[in-house]
Image (cartoon, rainbow, N blue to C red):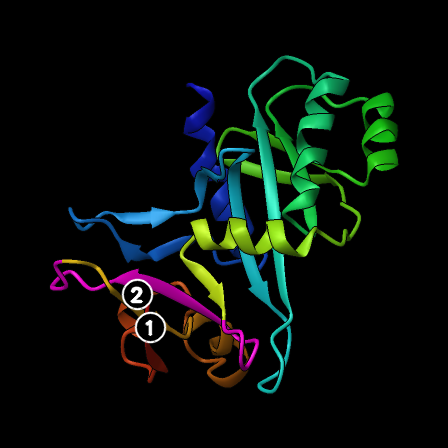
Amino acid sequence: MIEEDYYPIVRKWLEKEGYYCGGFIEDSKGKPIYFQNKGTKRLKIDVAGVKNHGTKALDEIEVVAVEVKDVASIQYRDIQDAYAYSQYAHKCYLATTGSIDEEDKHEAHCLGVGLLRINGNKVKEILSPKLNTPIQARMLQFLNVLEVCQCPICQTFFETYQYKSEKYKSFYSVTRPRYFDIARDHPDVDMFLQSELRKLPECRLNLEK
């Protein structure tokens, strides 16, 4: 397996932890777009997820970012690579197929980086990450890459995508992510089951560039 083959395994673990990692928006071929190998010119993140643990009146978004390494044993440089994600994310992990010793744990703890051990199709958290305060402008820039934006008026978060029928792409459909409210308002609905998501009401707003 190549390193990218482990991205879906890590993504599914994040989803079990309550994070949304893409998939609701599809590309032109109908293939789900996941938050894998996404980022800016400055930095790309292997696997990312978002979670809203706020209220109806106020969104409190949490971004998690994971660096994936398919190595026999991790190096301090690998931990630093994961720590670099802290400018975009509240929580940073290093996920590895290799061994993790006590020195690795100590070095990761000092930087606030969590450690995940990948074993086949399973992922186990070895060390919990520290909650960071990312650089707001860079976090919003990264979220924009994920097709997520923050309304400057109400401060809530929306998913964005361009109308396929709009030739000049001058309008965006800004859609309130249903998975932000499902766990709280619809506990009986599977937040990752697309057929169920589409049955729920959504908030739409058209903005002109």
The C terminus lies in quadrant = bottom left
The residue that appears at 56% across and 56% down in the rendered structure is 140
CA distance for labels 1 and 2:
5 Å
**Is residue 158 on the magenta stretch?**
yes
Place of residue 143 in the rendered image (x, y in percent of width and height, measured from the top left) = 50, 54
Residue 194's label in the rendered image is 2
- Answer yes or no: is residue 3 visible: yes
Q: Give the tally of numbered discs.
A: 2
Residue of label 1:
197
Q: Is residue 90 above or below residue 188?
A: above
**Disc 1 packing (10 Å; few <14; some 14–19; many ≥20):** some
**Is residue 101 on the magenta stretch?**
no
Q: Is residue 115 above or below residue 30?
A: above
- Answer yes or no: is residue 116 visible: no
Discs 1, 2 touching: Cβ within 8 Å: yes
Q: Main secondary structure of the magenta part?
A: loop
The residue that appears at 55% across and 19% down in the rendered structure is 70
Q: Position of 152 compared to 36: left or right?
A: right
